[in-house]
Image (cartoon, rainbow, N blue to C red):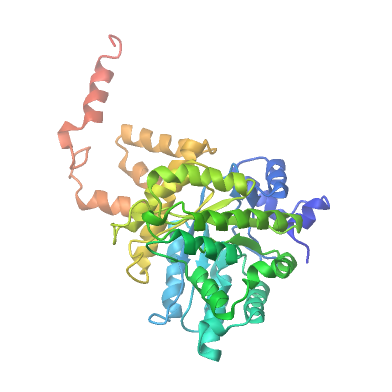
Amino acid sequence: MATIIDKLKKGYIAEIIDKVSQDEKIDKDTVIKDLLDGTIVIPANNNRNIKKPVGIGKGLRTKVNANIGTSDEYPYIDEELRKLDTALKAGADTIMDLSTGGPLVEIRKEMLKRSIVPIGTVPIYQAAVIAKETYGSIVEMTADDIFSVIENQAKEGVDFITVHSGITWKTIDALRKQGRVADVVSRGGAFTIGWMLKNDRENPLYEQFDRLLEIAKEHDVTLSLGDGLRPGCIADASDRAQFQELLILGELVDRAREAGVQVMVEGPGHMPFDHIKENVEIEKQVCKGAPFYVLGPLVTDIAAGYDHITSAIGGTMAAASGADFICYVTPREHLGLPTEQDVHDGVIAARIAAHAADIVKGIKGAKDWDLAMARARKALDWDAQIKISIDPKKAEASYKERKIKDIDGCTMCGDYCAMKIVAEYLGSHAETC
């Protein structure tokens, strides 16, 4: 089947281009140009008809991803499907299934069936689970085992996959020489490094990158080049291992584009606030404008239970500096598998960060949303404020819980409301003012 890129090169404008153009309120010729240039991607497997496709990249609204998925301790498919619904209701633009427990294929197929937005995975997770069950050890998997999982997931309809192709012997050498406090925190990165060290072989996702490209092109799967050496604490940020991997990812971006495969790049991680802008700019330079997908970044390590906030702070800075795609972090990050409420709170926090950055980027319509809220507040129109809010249910509950009866105000100020007082004064002295 033809990819979106193939269709565009032959002069055929796919329906999905029109949908993205209308959603973003930008000219479809701009979408086409940037898609062909590789500065935006539209993850959309050709085996699946996505009801709500999204564009990610240059000039587009900053998108938010929600990670969900089972574990050995919580292998319950029904719970994860409820989390899927929760994430979609909260406004997630994409979903990643990171399941490692229970019936993995069944879980993924159900998510693909139910999700109206693109679905992503990290295939090496399933390969690791199969290896542990088959051989008794994750590092005993074969290269063919990894590629078999990738091909099967592509056939099922997965829209984008994270592959840690930038981990090579050069990357590991840089990690050894640098030294780190937290070493490797990426599961996919750890599986890959462990496999390489155990088998004394190069990373098959790098060594056989052309094989990966063939699968991706056949099914129009977008590659998300993973940051297996992302810093897991701020002490490890912006080190040689991180940048060595990024340099390799830049080369792989070129190869993917030459093959007609859509590609984006993943980034850190934990990072001091003053490192973020430079890191985004370096990625954009090294990877020639490829869409940048960031986890956070988390700007401090001490906020266990509140890491949706630390990541929103970093996410705003990253997106305002040019990052295109934010992976949410939930309040339970570092502590346990998220609940449905954690998923909701994580999506909302990331969406706030994305929107704040979109105002800075000048994304069409971003400021209009805030202006509508400002006018509703000026008019003391509580119903409008609730409706306009990014989380109307939360806003309504907060207002009603401490609402003043028969008074046109809130319990913060009551009769001392600044807007009410000044509005009355300006109204009665309009001619003299």
Q: Nearer the viewer, residue 13 or 272?
A: 272
> What residue is rendered at 57% in x and 75% in y?
196
Q: Quadrant of the N terminus?
A: bottom right
Horizontal side of residue 18 vs 301, given as left or right: right
- Residue 9 in picture, x, y percent from top left: 81, 51
Q: Nearer the viewer, residue 175 or 20?
A: 175
Q: Residue furthest right?
A: 10
Q: Residue furthest front?
A: 177
Residue 33, picture quadrant = top right
> What residue is rendered at 52% in x and 35% in y?
362
- Residue 283 in picture, x, y percent from top left: 56, 48
Against 53, is 74 above or below?
below
Q: Can residue 309 be seen at all in this image of the molecule? A: yes
Q: Nearer the viewer, residue 172 or 272?
A: 172
Against 373, is 18 above or below?
below
Q: Residue furthest left?
A: 415
Q: Can residue 48 be seen at all in this image of the molecule? A: no
- Residue 343 in picture, x, y percent from top left: 39, 63
